[in-house]
């Protein structure tokens, strides 16, 4: 199977290491992943009453701009995202679809009056990126407290879980990837 996971920075340049994120995503899913700046217009997703951005609109734009060989496309942003039924979201994914998005906004220590910690921010973003991409491959929320597919409403919950799949989720993912065309999941290296 040819194709890539594209990692697309949206809006302001992120302080996180996008290259590292792409490399870890590639290792988790066994699919080449590259950083690709695209022309995404966040103003189309802005809700002036909530002063937040509609994540679903950004997903639609990512899909419009996705290269033909995109197996998945992941937006990374520091905008405050929401879906109408929730106060905020860390990210959103199309279940078994192509696009996902995650945001740093709610993952930053500064939001809670704690000094910035870029390494921690990077780790949180990575976990949420793998989580949302997991949804695009059909994975649902997992009860394993350390599994990356464990649902997280608060940053403490993100910090508690790991950045990899439990054995059960990994089996599901492997089956899904095989169906997609013979991708064999490598054992995670970190
Ligand atoms: Zn989820
Ligand atoms: Zn799991």
Image (cartoon, grey):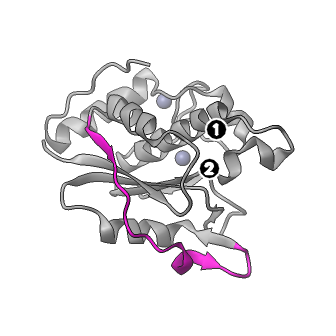
In the displayed structure, 79 sits above or below 24; it is below
Where residue 163 appears, x then y in whole percent? Answer: 51, 29
Left or right: residue 145 versus residue 44 is right
> Which of pointers 1 and 2 lies earlier in the amino acid sequence?
2
Q: Is residue 75 above or below residue 142?
A: below
Respond yes or no on whether mark 2 lies under 8 Å from ligand 1.
Answer: no
Question: Where does residue 178 sit, x and y in percent of width and height?
Answer: 19, 35
Which residue has dot 2 on it?
Answer: 104
CB of mark 1 within 8 Å of CB of mark 2? yes
Q: Quadrant of the N terminus?
A: top left
- The stretch in magenta equals 31-51
Q: Helix, strand, or loop for circle 2?
A: loop
Q: Are there few (<14), some (14-19), or many (20+) residues within 10 Å of tag 1?
A: many
Instruction: Specify the farthest residue to the right.
Output: 113
Where is residue 69 shown, x and y percent of the image? 18, 55
Residue at 31 percent of width and 44 percent of height: 34
- The residue shown at (79%, 49%) is 111
Front residue of 115/166: it is 115
Q: Secondary structure at mark 1?
A: helix
Question: What is the number of callouts on the image?
Answer: 2
* Residue 61 in the image, given as x and y percentages of width and height: 40, 71
Q: Which residue is mark 1?
A: 121
In-front residue for pair 14/131: 14
Which label is found at residue 113?
Answer: none
Residue 43 part of the magenta segment = yes
Please state if 146 lies on the left or on the right of 29 as rendered. right
Which quarter shows the C terminus? top left
For this view, does 171 lie left or right of residue 163?
left
């Amino acid at each position: 199977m040819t194709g890539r996971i594209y990692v697309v920075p949206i809006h302001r340049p992120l302080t996180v290491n996008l290259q590292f994120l792409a490399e870890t995503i590639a290792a988790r899913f066994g699919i080449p992943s590259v950083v690709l700046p695209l022309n995404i217009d966040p103003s189309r997703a802005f809700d002036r009453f909530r002063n937040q951005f509609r994540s679903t609109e950004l997903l639609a734009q990512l899909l419009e701009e996705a290269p033909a060989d995109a197996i998945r496309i992941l937006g990374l942003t520091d905008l405050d995202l929401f879906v109408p039924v929730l106060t905020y979201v860390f990210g959103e994914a199309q279940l078994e679809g192509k696009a996902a998005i995650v945001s740093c906004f709610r993952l930053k220590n500064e939001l809670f009056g704690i000094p910035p910690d870029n390494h921690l921010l990077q780790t949180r973003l990575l976990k949420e990126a793998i989580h949302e991409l997991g949804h695009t491959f059909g994975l649902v929320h997992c009860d394993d407290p350390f599994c990356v597919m464990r649902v997280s409403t608060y940053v403490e919950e993100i910090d508690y879980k790991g950045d990899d799949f439990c054995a059960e989720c990994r089996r599901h993912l492997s089956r899904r990837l095989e169906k997609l065309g013979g991708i064999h999941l490598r054992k995670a290296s970190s």
